[in-house]
Each structure stands twice: as C-alpha cells, then as structure tokens.
Image (cartoon, grey):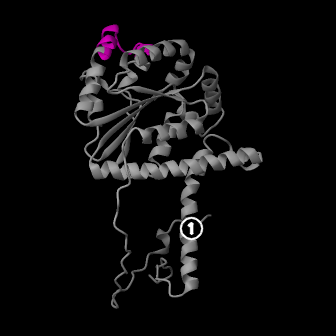
Amino acid sequence: MGFSRFEPTMTLPSTLSDHNDLMERIARDLVDSYDEEFELEIEDRSLEELESGRSADKAARQAYFKELFRLQGELVKLQDWVQHSRQKVVILFEGRDAAGKGGVIKRITQRLNPRVARVAALPAPNDRERTQWYFQRYVAHLPAAGEIVLFDRSWYNRAGVERVMGFCTDDEYEEFFRTVPDFERMLVRSGIKLIKYWFSITDEEQHMRFLGRIHDPLKQWKLSPMDLESRRRWEEYTKAKETMLERTHIPEAPWWVVQAVDKKKARLNCIAHLLGQLPYHEVPHPPIDLPARVRNADYLRQPVPESMYVPEVY
C-alpha cells in the first residue's frame, strides 16, 4: 500500500495573511452550521418558495433566524446553568397532531448537548407496560441532577388519545385525574422544575398541515392511521383537552398555551417563555487555550487503502 492520500493537518498561522485565511475558514464553518436551520426550514416550505419569495418574506425570514439564533444562545446559557447548579428540569409538550411540538423541540435541542438535554418520545405501551402503574414507564425517563428532559407527549396521553380512542376505561381515566396532581406535586417537591405546554391550532390549520403531509413524500411517514382518525374526531379531542386543562392546571405545575397557527412565532414565543421560567444566569468559564499538537520525529502516518474511502460523487 502506498501513501496515495493524506488527511489535512492544521498548522498554526505564521503570518497575518495565514491568520486571516484561518479566520475566514472558521467563519465559513459557522455559516455551514447555521445552514442546518435552513434545512429544517425546508420542512415548512419548498426550496422553490424559499428562493423565489418576496423581499418582505425574505426580510421576515431573516428577522426570524436572527431572533432564533439569539434565543438559542440563551438556551446554551440555560444549559450551562442547569448543569452547573445541578438543576432537574422537565418540559412537557402536548397538542393535537401536527400542532408543531416536534418543530419547537428540534429548535430547543438543536445546539444543546444531548447528554444534558434529551428528548423522551415514548411509543405506545407494550403488553407488560400496560400492567404497570400508569406513570411507571415515564418515571424511568425523569432527569437526574444537571439534566433537562423534553417529553414529546407525556403521561397526558391518557387524558387525550387514550380517552378519545377508547384505550382506557372510565375508571382508569378518573383515576388518572385523581393521581396526576399529586404525582406532579411530588415531582416538584423532589426538586424537579416541571413546565407544561399545550400547542393550540385551529381546525383549518390542522387540515392544511395534514394535506401538506399527504402530498409531500418526505412527510407522509408522519401520518399514522391514528392521526387520520384524530382528524375525524376533532370535537372529541377538543372536549378531552378542555377537561384536561381544567382538571390538571395546578399552581405547582400550571399549563401554558402556545398559539401555534404560525409555526415560527410559536417557536420563538415558546422558547422565550421557557427561558423566563428559570432563573438562569451565565456561568463563567475559564478562557480556552488550544494546546499545540505534540509532534514526534519518528511518527509515520499509516496509509489507508483507496478501497476504504467513500466515493466522492459530489
């Protein structure tokens, strides 16, 4: 095997020109990292719409990105504070199908450390879990000190989908409402900060979002038979939601309703409100000094076979 290919190595800049080139490369890498948000944006609108939008639309989009990046910077500070002060934070996201819960969760966690901020999105309970105490499988996902857990749907499934679809009995439904306030008070007494969001959309908006998923091959996986049935039972879900909010809105863990017809505004409003719910502050960090790489004269980089490289088709 010969040395047909090498990986680039980073050397310290020796001149002002080299320094400027290095800073330009770093700046390009930062821009590339922000392109991730642009990729997420394509979930909401087609690439053609994004490129051919009116100047007013482009200005609004720029304002949205600017504010989103600012809020995400604050979320990083919040994360550092949670880790430093060993807080325990639980955030519940509830709402109708296609209400935008997943979108805001993505924007919250997008720039955070997954070891500190993690998402719990539990599937339907299996046969064994159905015989357990109802809250048992959720307890396993609660945070330890220095962690944030975001529940993409939660124990409130019993008050919503299980009630409407007949997956629980009337007695189980009533027992849930008797138990959940005490359960949440117990979490709060244990030191967990519990924040609950309901994402609210109109009948017409859900209809449009479902149609968008039906006609987009990249989004069709988001539509399950249960989602389609929930569309038919809109009024039953409304009644279930009203009962849930009325019976579980407690001082220790109140509900917060996010107006979510406009996805971008909903994301910004939710994140801004979340930041206001916790008394975080910027945690000072010592300056980071990148150490020089140790170089040994007898080190010889071993060649990699050409056949192991991924073909560069782009």
Position of residue 135 relative to residue 163, above or below, is: below
Q: Give the camera-side residue of 7 and 303.
A: 7
Answer above or below: position of 203 versus 98: above
**Measured from the top left, where is residue 199 in percent x and y?**
50, 28
Check if residue 256 falls in the magenta segment: no
Which image quadrant is residue 54 in? Answer: top right
Q: Where is residue 149 in the image (x, y as percent from the top left)?
A: 35, 40
In the picture, which quadrant includes the N terminus? Answer: bottom left
Q: Can residue 133 be seen in this view?
A: yes
Q: Is the stretch drawn in magenta largely helix, strand or loop? A: helix
Q: Does the magenta stretch include residue 167?
A: yes
- Read off the magenta span: 163-177
Tell me the residue at 48%/50% (across/down).
72
Q: Mark 1 points at which residue?
A: 27
Question: x and y percent of residue 40 in the render?
Answer: 57, 46
- The amino acid at mark 1 is Ala
